[in-house]
Image (tube, rainbow, N blue to C red):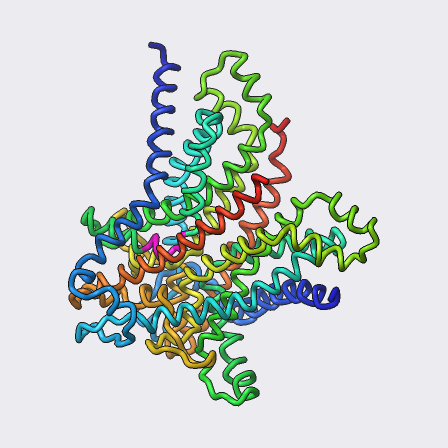
Amino acid sequence: MNRGKWFDLLSDNWMLLATLLMSILPLSVGFGLLIESMPLLRQYHLRHLVSSSAWSPAEGKFGMLSFITGTLWVTGLSLCMAAPVSLLVSIYITQYAKPWLMRTIHLVMDILAGIPSVVYGVWGVLVIVPWISQKLAPALGYSSSGYCVLSGGIVLAVMSIPYILHLQIEIFRTIPIELKEISLSLGATYWETIKYVLLKQARRGIIASVGLGISKALGETIAVLMVVGNVPQIPENMFQAGYPLPALIANNYGEMMSIPHYLSALMFAGLILFLIICLFNSISHWIIHKMHQT
Amino acid sequence: MKCIMAIATYSIILVFIYMILVISREGIPALSWEMISEIPGGGFYFGKEGGILNAIIGSVYLSVGGTFLSLLISIPVALYLNIHLLHYNRITAGIRYLLDILWGIPSILYGAFGFVLMIVFHLQASLLAGIITLALMITPIIIRAFDEALQGIPEGMLEACYAMGLTRRQIAFQVFIRQAMPGLITATLVGFGRAIGDAASVLFTTGYTDYIPKSLYDPTASLPLAIFFQLSSPIPEVRERAYAAAFILTIIILMISLLIRLCTSRLSKYQI
């Protein structure tokens, strides 16, 4: 065989191998996390782990409820802020704005999406935390150190907006312009067209984009960890500190080898996170896939 | 209603500008030539002399190594999806779905998975483990971006290549890569930017050290971890160093974004 044939064989097989490797990677990540959590799951009952908020690894107490609620608080707050803002901005950009504004927003979005998590964390510590502890919390009658779930929510909202916005702009672009023209020609005002025609068409895509925003917000670690307070308690209001799941994993990697079952507990937290994120991701992508089909 | 939307839009731009301003305002005063050219001295973490050269070089080693390793896997996968598997729509849909799941997995879980791999292969926290973890993390990003660029190549090009008798390997590496070169460079730069800024995946797997790594098995410092560790110090001078490091990292990312925009417009000369 000549040299070209050897290259063909090498290349084709390497491509196949690489593709197979990438295809089994999601399963192996889940599997690896599962196997490492097995020691903990064999020792404690699953229901006890997920419903108890007693967290004291040195005494063998691994109740994950505080972390799950912390994650829910932070993610929920961030989505309450990010979803309306991105919807408003995406409608404005695709329907009303001049081209230079669209280019500027694209540029800003790309750069914001690329800024590392630590830099968002630094900004949060410098700006958001003092603002909450000195201005916002006293104004609403609470006293807070500023390191609370609300700070985490605000920082996460700013981080998720570029992703949600990008997806929503694409969705609005795929709506055929004839739909708008027909509605306007029937006498609807511009705003009525947007509200009743465009939003209805794009409804599924908007849900999918929010779903993807949720899965992004669930997993962000470093930025949230720097501003959220890291106290293993169930936050009673948004000005109290919390402790989301990713922050738990990141903070305790140093001590986990010395206490029995600590590593398994952290891997179990990772497994919970992985399953929730995969669920949201799959649903969102399935919705998008269905949208492209029709 | 239109007013509210306009306010929302302009406030995003304002928040962005404000963020850059805050980082610059805190970071630039603490920046000095010795900061970027020396490794930490003895009393570095108590406010004395030294710099963060260990973190800068460590980050460069990690990102370049991780991006290179990732390209070894991403380029073949994307080309395979678009050339060999072109007509197997169900299979490509399935693989793209799996890649989307991988894209959505947060970096802390890649760090945890990297840690599991380290346990299985008996590796210490080292440059090698960090490079492997980073490569795993940015491969879905690069595949997705390159795949979109490849999907933009008209099918007529593929048919013309087959008509001339090219093998699939030749089509892949001599035709398609050249056609999608802007997309490939963009994808690589995006991956590189992600790799250099990510802290959660290198936290477990790479460790931290004051020295520049001399072998693949040495622990390595990285810029995001340098910022993270120094920010929580009680000493103000050390905190200011964290701001300066954050400023350096932001400048690197801004330069990469600029490069991406330039490359997209300049490198289209092979495209039809």
Question: In the image, which residues are magenta?
Answer: B105-111
Look at 36% across and 14% down and name the residue there: A3
Residue A242 in which image quadrant: bottom left
Q: What main secondary structure does the magenta stretch of the protein show?
A: helix
Q: In terms of image quadrants, where is residue B52?
A: bottom left
Residue B97 falls left or right of residue B179: left
Q: Is the N terminus of chain A in the top left, top right, bottom left or bottom right quadrant?
A: top left
The image shows residue B187, relative to residue B77, as above or below, that is below
x, y percentage for residue A124?
A: 50, 71
As drawn, B103 above or below A91:
above
Residue name at image x 51 percent, y 67 percent: A78
**Number of numbered discs overlaid on the protein picture:** 0
Q: Nearer the viewer, residue B215 or A137?
A: A137
Query: Residue B268 occupies which quadrant of the picture?
Result: top right
Residue A26 is inside the magenta segment? no
On the question of residue A246 being in view, the answer is: yes
Question: Front-most of B212 and A284?
Answer: A284
Residue B239: percent from the left, percent from the top? Answer: 43, 73
Do we see residue B54 in this rendering?
A: no
Camera-nearest residue between B201 and B193:
B201
Residue at the far front in the pictured view: A186
